[in-house]
Image (cartoon, grey):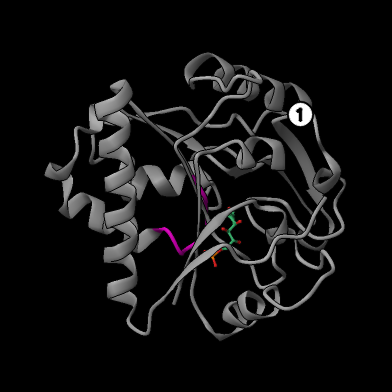
Amino acid sequence: MSKNTVDFAFLFEDERTLYRNLLGLILEIAQEAIAEKDAFYWAISGGSTPLPLFDLMKVEKDSLDWSKVYTFWADERCVAPDHEDSNFGTAHKKLLQYLPLHYFRMEAELQERDQAAENYEQILQKIVPLTDEGKPQLDVVLLGMGGDGHTASLFPDTSVLEETTKLVAPVYVEKLDSWRLTLTYPMINAAKHKVVAIKGKGKRAIFEEIQTIEAMKYPIQGIDEAVWFVG
Ligand code: 6PG
């Protein structure tokens, strides 16, 4: 896996400006996609970073034909959809219940995690337009980053970082003592736009560090041609 320096970044001192610009970019890509193919396909991450964006989307609900939006997840915790840790549950509470968009959640609560990953891969293959190589090509993958440089559930020292064939895979995160399902690098990197949003000194330090190091030190470096929104 090659390391990737930061490809393009917007730095913000003011959080509100970060999110207004992030919304602007996503709406612009979505409007172009809908004009081109009558649909916009995106995957969202969990965690807290996307939440202010969801709030803005509800305010700007008239800015897009949400019935043409198809929502997927970059990762999911292996819990029931109504569990407080569920990325789907959080997104449903904060966004999905307010807008008429389509969504396809990962059934990460299934004990047969390999089957759950395979099921989701088949959904992606069926719903999302394919590249010439036969990979589902999302318009946007909205990513966050953890303090250890993980993104989606691509955590340091996990075997899923080496996955080059599967598009969705289960991963056991030892330090969290928990299982997750995640899109893999091949699936994320096939997307037209990889948008990484981070806030805070610690994450900004990683952002600055990866512009200078040669080694692959953080999983986020495996995301090709990312556009960064740095707060
Ligand atoms: C998850 C996310 C994860 C998240 C980072 C950052 O399921 O937790 O997909 O990759 O993006 O952990 O989380 P915050 O946005 O809460 O800092």
Of all residues, the one furthest to the left in this rendering is 62
- Residue 196: x and y in percent read 52, 59
Question: Magenta stretch mostly in which secondary structure?
Answer: loop
Residue at the spot 45% in from the left edge and 44% down from the top edge = 89
Residue at the spot 76% in from the left edge and 37% down from the top edge = 170
User: Residue 47 magenta-drawn?
Assistant: yes
Residue at the spot 33% in from the left edge and 43% down from the top edge = 29
Residue 155 against residue 92 in the figure, above or below? below
Q: Please state the extent of the stretch shown in magenta in the rendering.
A: 44-50
Whether residue 216 appears in this view of the structure is: yes
- Residue 165: x and y in percent read 79, 29
User: Residue 110 magenta-drawn?
Assistant: no
Pointer 1: residues within 10 angstroms few (<14), some, or many (20+)?
Answer: some
Amino acid at circle 1: Lys
- Residue 41: x and y in percent read 41, 32
Residue 206 against residue 168 in the figure, above or below? below
Is ligand 1 within 8 Å of the beta carbon of the residue shown at mark 1? Answer: no
Q: Quadrant of ligand 1?
A: bottom right
Residue 108 or 21: which is nearer the viewer?
21
Q: Which residue is mark 1?
A: 166
Determine the image quadrant of residue 163. Answer: top right
Q: Is residue 22 left or right of residue 87?
A: left
Determine the image quadrant of residue 220. Answer: bottom right
Residue at the spot 57% in from the left edge and 38% down from the top edge = 80
- Residue 191: x and y in percent read 54, 38
Whether residue 184 appears in this view of the structure is: no
Residue 152 against residue 52 in the figure, above or below? above
Q: Could you tell me which quadrant the C terminus lies in?
A: bottom left
SS at circle 1: loop
